[in-house]
Amino acid sequence: MPRFPGKAGLPADVVESLETMRRVLREIVRTPGRLGIVLVLWILAGPGSSCAAVLDARDFGVVGDGVTDDGPAISRMVAAARNDTDRPTTLRFSPGRSYRVASIPGPWLFEFDGVEGLVIEGGGAVFLLDREPRFLSLTRCGKVRVCGLKVDHVPLPFVDGTVTAVDAARRRIEVRLAAGAAPPTGGPTKAGGEQAFFALLWEGGEEPDRHRHVWVERIEAGVADGTAVLTPAVEFKAYGAITAGQTRISLPVPGLAHRRGPGAMFRVSGNKGVCFEDIELWSAPWFGFEIDRNEGEVVFRRAHIRPKPGSGRLLSTWRDGFHVKGNRGALLWEDCIVSGMGDDAFNISTHSSVVSRVLSPTRIEVKQKFPLLFVPWRVQGPITAADEESARLLGNARVLAVETRPNPAIPGEADRAPDCLITLDRAVEGWKPGTMVWNPESANPRAVLRNCHIGMSCRFQAPVILEGCTTRALMWFYSERVEGVFPAGARITGCTMRRGRGNDRAALIVSGAPKTGGDAAWAGPRAFHDIVIENNRFYGDVIVEGVENLRFARNRIETTEATLRLHGNPSSEVTGNTGADGAPLAPK
């Protein structure tokens, strides 16, 4: 065995390295063959090495009894992980525990920026968040894995009930609340980002799959215990759609429901590799997940957003389940259940811009239509242009240079989009002030939903791929100027789609039709193009309009009252589609 020189005066980390080397050499000498190699690797990866760190929640005083406020103890655990930046870190929680979180130093219980190799192992534990905390924020991180945990909100941002009486003349809806629920009295407010501005009327029986927004003026306690009185805003007119004793309703908790506040329950922004596995999110005051501007892969496997099973609740999130914007990296949802949203299950889009000035044939000024969450342009990246009104594709170019001109800040919002001067590699005919432009590389070009069960409407303004999904809501592919681009290249294969939330008749709508103009407005090239809809079963209307190079093949419309409408789709292939009786189906 070699002998090391004396260790006196050497730094502690050098001494530790020498000791590790000595143990490795000793085991190699003592244990020949493959077993020796295994032992060496075990030593190198053991507790005394710098390969990885495991932080156990119990070592930081986390109790997990569902009563004790574990927020401060978990915050100490998170601080320890943030301070140990030289090696991958695992945060481990005990299986089957409930962690109540009432007080934390920041907006998110887990907040990490710029870390690599982080793992959060929930062990199936439940995290019960109080009014203010949100759960997780990951920004500029890489190789992160979050698994095996459940998240709920206590108190809930909503109260469910059943309508017992309706008086349209007095603008009065009386409600019997769920057992044990207190009336969420108060009115909507916009102070501090709080906007409790709508309630939800549910349709569809014991397990409703459709709802209608009711704009709220105020909520008061009823005469009897466990009752409330809702005063809708003057804009609400659908009193005739309410059946006393049958129609169910969800009332917002003012100051909590709809509250953007700290943000989504999970924020995933600007990362390079994140994986969520075996996640349950049962309630959120605003978005469930906000996923934006990620550069690397973001994966969700068995990540469910739904009302807590067995609870009888109607809602999960007050706004979108997955709000997805401006990602360059691949996005995958696999074997996920998404239902119970007050808004959309998925909103997958980006922020487009408009040409504000044409300075020369190869130099333009562009302005992001929505002023926040800036989606940056990149040199040598592509730029695509379309006319929004006619949905006609104008052309593509490449960005040679970008100059930004910052805009005045918006109070409370740091991410204000600047105006940009863009130099192009070539002139594109038809570009003018008002032309819609975007970068297709940052428009979620590789978003895949595979084997997912979706029970709320989806807005797809990106080339989303649906494979083997089961849906009970409107799947809507479309484009509008503020929040989206044209979803060219979308694919829907092997899915079962039923009508539900979002439209009383349609299961799928692809809206590539021009907004104005006569027959000439349908001329190509179309901004909606290269869309495949193949081997699906539909239990509701299917409408596809204004798509160039559409493939609609071997689909089956399973209900006799449903219709198929294919209109204005040049260069299309429509073949092998059948009705409920198996007979060939001709589109209307």
Image: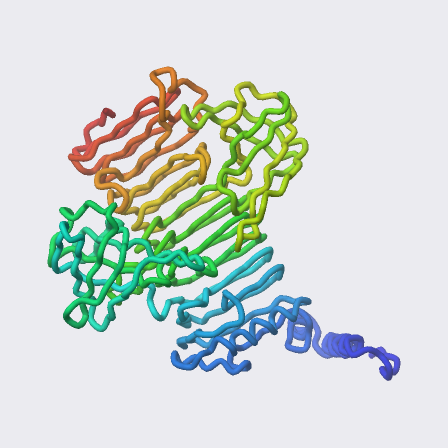
Q: How many marks?
A: 0
Percent coordinates x, y for residue 359 in the rendering: 63, 24
Residue drawn at (20%, 38%) of the image: 558
Q: How is the image coloured?
A: rainbow
Quadrant location, the N terminus: bottom right
Using residue 527 as the reference point, say whether residue 539 is left or right of it: left
Relative to 116, residue 75 above or below: below
Residue at the extreme front = 170
Asked if one can make out residue 415 in the rendered structure from this viewpoint, the answer is yes
Residue 423 image-quadrant placement: top right
Residue 186 image-quadrant placement: bottom left
Residue drawn at (34%, 17%) of the image: 518
Percent coordinates x, y for residue 112 in the rendering: 57, 63
Depth check, front residue: 471 or 39: 471
Residue at the extreme top = 520
Relative to 63, residue 42 above or below: above
Percent coordinates x, y for residue 30 in the rendering: 73, 79
Asked if one can make out residue 34 in the rendered structure from this viewpoint, the answer is no
Relative to 191, residue 464 above or below: above
